[in-house]
Image (spheres, grey):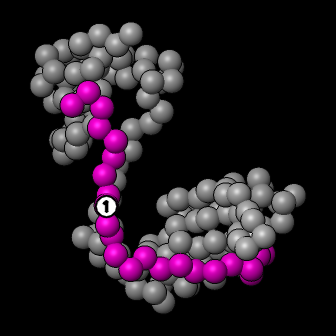
């Protein structure tokens, strides 16, 4: 069972991280606890599986990345783990997922790359293809961003 303090911490962690040298100190002060108490609670939440990770979301369009390409790859079943780990390790890949296939959709690995334009995305994708030695893929470009939010709990 989560305490009122736990819920306050979770609500605070859902907000934007303050742009200060010690963001957790600022967050802790707003909650009314010490930075050490907050960091201990975060570690406790992680060890209990309540919190998986804390991550930042970059608004890629505002940062100058106008092209977003989801690349769907047809990876041999025996190579999925190896190829998936290689793709996921590349700095240019922001998302990497294994997906179920069907008779009409044989692509089993999905990756996301961003570029300032389509040409830059295509150069990145070619580099990935050369690295993993797989050329059976399709590029699906985003046409419009409809929603970009994270889950909110205890509001």
Q: Is residue 132 visible?
A: no
Residue at the extreme bottom of the image, as rendered: 119
Q: Residue at x 31, y 52 (%)?
A: 149
Residue located 40% across and 85% down the image: 117
Q: Secondary structure at mark 1?
A: loop
Q: Quadrant of residue 3?
A: top left
Read off the magenta span: 133-155
Image quadrant for the C terminus?
top left
- Residue 154: x percent and y percent? 26, 27
Q: Position of residue 52 (x, y in %)?
A: 48, 33
Q: Is residue 149 magenta?
A: yes
Instruction: State whether residue 24 is above or below residue 134.
Output: above
Q: Is residue 6 magenta?
A: no
Residue 125 appears left or right of 54: right
Seen from the viewer's position, the closer of residues 20 and 94 is 94
Q: Residue farthest to the right?
A: 78
Q: Which residue is mark 1?
A: 147
The quadrant where residue 102 appears: bottom right
């Amino acid at each position: 069972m989560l305490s009122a303090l736990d819920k306050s911490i979770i609500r605070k962690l859902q907000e934007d991280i303050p742009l200060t040298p010690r963001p957790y100190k600022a967050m802790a002060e707003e909650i009314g606890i010490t930075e050490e108490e907050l960091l201990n609670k975060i570690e406790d939440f992680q060890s209990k599986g309540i919190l998986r990770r804390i991550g930042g979301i970059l608004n890629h369009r505002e940062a100058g990345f106008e092209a977003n390409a989801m690349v769907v790859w047809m990876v041999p079943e025996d190579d999925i783990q190896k190829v998936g780990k290689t793709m996921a390790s590349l700095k240019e890949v922001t998302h990497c997922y294994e997906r179920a296939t069907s008779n009409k959709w044989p692509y089993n690995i999905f990756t996301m790359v961003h570029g300032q334009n389509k040409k830059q995305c295509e150069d990145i994708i070619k580099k990935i293809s050369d690295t993993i030695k797989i050329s059976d893929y399709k590029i699906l470009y985003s046409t419009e961003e409809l929603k970009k939010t994270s889950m909110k709990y205890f509001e």
